[in-house]
Image: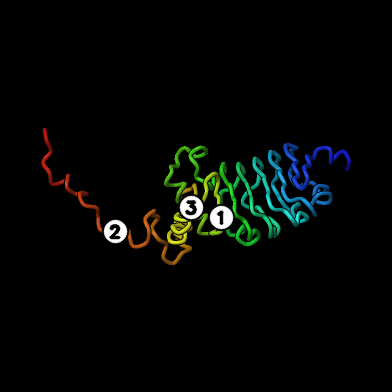
Amino acid sequence: MANNESLVALNGTQISYIGHDCKEIPEFLGETYGQFARRLDLSFNQLRSLAGLKMFTELEELIVDNNLLGNDLQLPRLPNLHTLTLNKNHLTDIEALLEHLADVTPSLEYLSLLGNEACPNQLVSPDKDEDDYQRYRYFVLYKLPQLKFLDTRKVTKREGMEAQERGAFMKVVKPKPEASLNEAGSESHPLPYSPLPRGSRDPMPHKGTNLQQNQPQGG
């Protein structure tokens, strides 16, 4: 135990266990620090599960950047958790993650998902642009309306209002086109993927679409 504890950086109620290549949270961490830890940093490990968090009942901040966490991620209920950073993991299913977080982290105000496929950020996905990222933000804020910060940006009041109006239609398209085709059948009336708010979608062709066909070609 003493040897294990020598790997832990302890500062009051802040616990750091960084860069030890562990695939799950060691039992001794919960047994020794779980009842009083307010902040836990488990970055730069090889975590595939966070099951060991069940003993950290008072946790307010959790940092698990640079791990191997995937779509099977399960957190215990953490009623006091206000900060969660999951940067650089293997998360691809944003909807399932957000629904889980809404259920188990009712006090969450700061969430960061940069470096995951679920977060269409240009630094990680060169084919994504600012519009893709903004749609993602609307969808996240629609699912988690209490957030004050998402990734590195503060949530503005206007953005929060836009998210409630439009976020339901901003589901981030899955990376594989086949997947989105298959999933379309699961909804009775799937809406077209559009960044426009409801009521702004114009079914008529845009003016000028066919103008060139009628104009003589210049030599």
In this rendering, position of residue 113 left or right of residue 176: right
State yes or no: discs 3 and 1 in contact (Cβ < 8 Å): no
Give the distance between the C-alpha atoms of the residues marked 3 and 2, in whole angstroms.
28 Å
Residue 211, image x and y in percent? 17, 47
Q: Amino acid at mark 2?
A: Asp
Q: Earlier in the sequence, mark 3 or mark 1?
A: 1
Residue 24, image x and y in percent? 75, 46
Q: Which residue is mark 3?
A: 156
Residue at figure coordinates x 48%, y 39% from the top left = 122
The tag on residue 147 is 1
Q: How many marks?
A: 3
Q: Amino acid at mark 3?
A: Thr
Residue 37, image x and y in percent? 76, 50
Closest to the camera, between mark 3 and mark 1, is 3
- Regarding residue 133, the answer to whether it shows in the image is yes
- Regarding residue 181, the answer to whether it shows in the image is no
- Quadrant of the rendering where the C terminus is positioned: top left
